Image (spheres, rainbow, N blue to C red):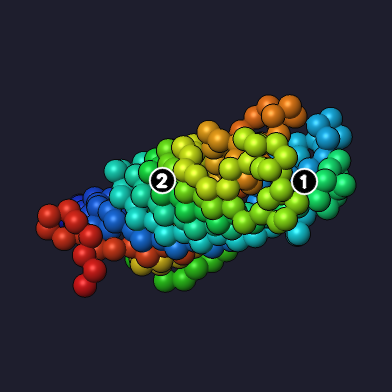
Amino acid sequence: MKRSLFVVVIFCFAIQLSDAQLWKLRRWEAQLGIGPSFSFPDIGGYTHGENILGFKDLSYRQTRFDINGNLRYRLGRTANLRASMTYAMLHAVDERGSNENRGYEAVTNLFEPALLGEYYFIKNKYESSYLFLKGKSLWAMLSSLDFYAFAGVGGAAYSVNPNDALSQREITQPGSTDFNGFALVIPAGIGATLVYNPNLNFGVEFGGRWANTDFIDGFDPPVVSKVNDKYYFLNFTVTYKLKTNSKGLPSFR
């Protein structure tokens, strides 16, 4: 009886030890994300003081989309490095708020490479044992959620397509517009991931970008504008876990 109990304890310990190393076999992850994009530029918008937290500037008309691809490397169970490439379209128009009579409109195409660090402040309980789960109860699904914060550094190559009214601004007030450029951006945000099975995760991520330029929408009013442009992404993500070869590199076979 004692010998049988001892064997069971050793067996359980061995399983837990091997499970704890499972994530090391999938250190590399490829991720695709897509969702709405929106910004709070100098075109459009309500007067400061009449627009608490900028919520009045959120509208379907201003919303566009983004799509991004990511390659993630797991430093540990709670820390990752991630290389990201994003294409986004942003839209701004003076159709409501305090600048309706101005009539400016701009569509921005933006490419953003970035290097991000992630920290998981809530880590799921089943990552090391979901291979052995027979079913997915509601509690098991909830216990398979990760919550993380991210921040990093990147760049934004942007190209603005202005309407005629905004194009004329460069003639009447030179220096207040710039329709092409590259800017440093600081991304930061939060996200949640559901560990669905050994190969796939599903998630949602919300992040903002601070740019060191005020020309993401092509327009910088010299008197009114006091802060640089900001833009935001809300992405729904699918992550595929890549096998790691003997050299620690991702294996695509």
Percent coordinates x, y for residue 170 in the rendering = 66, 43
- Residue at the extreme left of the image, as rendered: 246
Q: How many marks?
A: 2
User: Where, by quadrant of the figure, is residue 230 drawn?
Assistant: top right
User: Identity of the amino acid at label 2?
Assistant: Ala
Q: Residues within 10 Å of mark 2 (few under 14, many from 20)?
A: many
Residue situated in front as seen by the camera: 52 or 164: 164
Point out the image quarter for the C terminus: bottom left
Residue 196, image quadrant: bottom left
Please identify the residue farthest to the front as the structure is shown.
Answer: 171
Residue name at image x 51 percent, y 61 percent: 67
Q: Position of residue 141 (x, y in %)?
A: 52, 61
Mark seen at residue 44: 1
Q: Taking 139 as reference, is 125 left or right? A: left
* Residue 157 x/y as whole percent: 47, 48
Q: Looking at numbered disc 1 in the image, what kind of residue is underneath it?
A: Gly
Q: Is residue 74 visible?
A: yes
From the viewer's perspective, tell me whether residue 115 is left or right of residue 205: left
Q: Quadrant of the N terminus?
A: bottom left
**Mark 2, secondary structure of its residue:** strand
For image coordinates 62% across by 35% down, the residue present is 175
The kind of secondary structure element at disc 1 is loop
Q: Is residue 153 left or right of residue 137?
A: left
Q: Earlier in the sequence, mark 1 or mark 2?
A: 1
**In this rendering, the label closer to the viewer, 1 or 2:** 1
